[in-house]
């Protein structure tokens, strides 16, 4: 080491002298003393390395600002609100359904203090958390009884544990679905201790296939919504009502994992008809399971609706306790279901507002964006519903298309905005779909785009 490097290393301030400076108080106040100390030590270590590589000695202010940058980066929150400009309405990676104003208010009210979660005001005694959403769920689906778990995967597992553990459950080979990242129906079934009996072929399963597979040990027939793929061509699945008849003639339960669980018909919006909870129950399913945060448009939850005796058995199962919904979830779910009961779901629930959005209004919004930016083109395109519903179906939309030199780098700059903007890229253009950008987000969105254009 040369004497010169030695001098420059010796000129570095100590951790203690840095900590004694006024700027350090802001760091310890924001991040805590231990984290601030750690960052200062790491910053000094970096400086020593740089000095050995020929750099000059940074002054204390520079060291403190480097430490501040390090802390800001390390402590940046990982769960942040974003602007969804992808046009995928129920985007699982982006948190699925945005909640209605009423659901948000209900969650806030319950979160801030005590509540009647398990308290019955009339007698002034212990009550049940089951009651809050159950009656509403029955009202809007026509089910005899209902139960809320914390998500649909848990609901399916609970049903299998309660009714098929150590016994056989029949499922069509065409319905051994993988839903999103790693949730495979056959794996869940095995976790429950149910013995999976695959029937039929991938593309065709008949009533006779089910009938031939029934043994002494069979307890349930499970139907699973194909969620995220569509089979076309030479395909066949028996009618639900015929399956129900077969199941009941052998004393078996017919369980339908509906996945998305629409309560409203999707057909009026130019989409295929998504099977509804009401139809599944009318067809004779004993229990149907579905998510709270897909087409229902509420918070994360797994809803089970169906026959009263079967729901009562589920409630008694120990696993029900392990997967029960929390109070915030229930508050949001109840408010969401109230919108359906009032017949106001289309007006009040963001998911349905987006699905039913008027294409003319979407186009005018994209044109306003274009005028404000002074660049881009408004082009026809397609939005999707997502969330394991309506695979392959699209909604006609209007997109703002930006022709920029490096679309990937531009999209990355949009993701670095605050709040981050998530866009789509197709045919070397950055595409932004107004359908999924919430009302009130235009200003932030345009600000992010302008900044990204300016730094390009
Ligand atoms: C989405 C989905 C699930 C999982 O639901 P979560 O609420 O995410 O746990 C299960 N089954 C089907 C058919 C689905 O589409």
Image: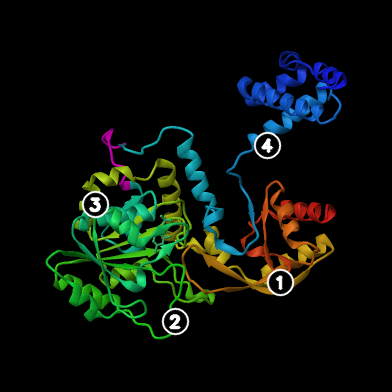
- Residue for badge 4: 73
> Quick one: 443 or 238, which is closer to the camera?
238
Q: Nearer the viewer, mark 1 or mark 3?
A: 1
Counting residues from the N terminus, which is met first, the one under dot 1 or under dot 2? 2
**Helix, strand or loop for the magenta stretch, by majority:** loop
What residue is rendered at 43% in x and 46% in y?
329
Q: Distance of mark 4 from mark 1, alpha carbons? A: 34 Å
Q: Distance of mark 4 from mark 2, alpha carbons? A: 48 Å
- Residue for badge 1: 427
Q: Nearer the viewer, mark 3 or mark 2?
A: 2
Q: Distance of mark 1 from mark 2, alpha carbons? A: 27 Å
Within 10 Å of the Cα at label 1, are there few (<14), some (14-19), or many (20+) other Cα atoms?
few
Residue 226 coordinates in the image, percent (x, y): 40, 70
Marks 1/3 in contact by CB < 8 Å: the verdict is no
Residue 201 coordinates in the image, percent (x, y): 32, 78
234 shown above or below 184: below
Marks 3/2 in contact by CB < 8 Å: the verdict is no
Mark sitting on residue 270: none
Mark 1 near ligand 1 (CB under 8 Å)? no
Q: Secondary structure at mark 3?
A: helix
- Residue for badge 2: 232
Could you tell me if residue 135 is visible in this image? no
Q: Quadrant of the N terminus?
A: top right
Q: Distance of mark 3 from mark 2, alpha carbons? A: 36 Å
Within 10 Å of the Cα at label 3, are there few (<14), some (14-19), or many (20+) other Cα atoms?
many
Counting residues from the N terminus, which is met first, the one under dot 1 or under dot 3? 3
Position of 425 with respect to 13 (left or right) is: left
- Residue for badge 3: 314
């Amino acid at each position: 080491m040369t004497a010169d490097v030695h001098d420059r290393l010796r000129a570095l301030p100590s951790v203690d002298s840095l900590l004694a400076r006024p700027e350090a108080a802001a760091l310890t106040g924001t991040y805590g003393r231990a984290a601030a100390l750690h960052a200062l030590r790491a910053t000094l270590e970096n400086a020593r390395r740089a000095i050995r590589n020929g750099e000059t000695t940074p002054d204390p202010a520079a060291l403190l600002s480097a430490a501040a940058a390090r802390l800001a980066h390390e402590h940046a929150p990982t769960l942040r609100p974003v602007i969804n400009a992808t046009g995928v309405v129920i985007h699982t990676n982006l948190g699925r359904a945005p909640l209605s104003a009423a659901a948000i208010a209900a969650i806030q009210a319950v979160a801030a203090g005590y509540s009647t979660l398990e308290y019955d005001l009339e007698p002034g005694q212990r009550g049940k958390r089951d009651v809050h959403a159950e009656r509403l769920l029955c009202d809007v689906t026509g089910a005899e009884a209902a139960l809320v778990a914390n998500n649909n995967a848990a609901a399916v597992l609970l049903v299998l544990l309660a009714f098929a553990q150590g016994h056989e459950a029949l499922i069509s080979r065409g319905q051994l679905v993988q839903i999103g990242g790693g949730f495979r129906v056959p794996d869940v079934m095995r976790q429950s201790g149910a013995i999976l009996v695959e029937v039929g072929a991938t593309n065709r399963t008949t009533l006779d296939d089910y009938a031939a597979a029934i043994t002494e040990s069979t307890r349930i027939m499970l139907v699973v919504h194909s969620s995220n793929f569509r089979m076309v061509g030479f395909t066949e699945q028996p009618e639900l009502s015929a399956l129900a008849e077969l199941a009941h003639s052998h004393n078996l339960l017919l369980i339908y994992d509906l996945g998305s669980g629409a309560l409203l018909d999707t057909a009026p919006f130019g989409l295929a008809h998504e099977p509804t909870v009401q139809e599944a129950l009318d067809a004779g399913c004993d229990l149907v399971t579905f998510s709270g945060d897909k087409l229902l448009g509420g918070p994360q939850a797994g809803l089970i609706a169906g026959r009263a005796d079967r729901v009562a058995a589920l409630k008694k199962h120990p696993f029900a306790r392990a997967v029960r919904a929390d109070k915030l979830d229930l508050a949001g779910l109840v408010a969401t279901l109230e919108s359906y009961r009032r017949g106001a779901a289309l007006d009040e629930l963001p998911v349905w507002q987006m699905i039913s959005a008027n294409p003319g209004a979407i186009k005018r919004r994209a044109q306003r964006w274009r005028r404000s930016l002074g660049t881009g083109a408004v082009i026809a395109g397609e939005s999707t519903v997502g969330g394991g519903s309506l695979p392959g179906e699209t909604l006609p939309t209007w997109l703002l298309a930006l022709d920029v030199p490096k679309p990937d780098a531009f999209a990355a700059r949009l993701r670095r905005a605050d709040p981050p903007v998530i866009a789509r890229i197709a045919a070397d253009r950055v595409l932004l779909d107004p359908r999924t950008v919430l009302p009130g987000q235009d200003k932030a969105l345009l600000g992010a785009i302008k900044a990204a254009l300016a730094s390009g």
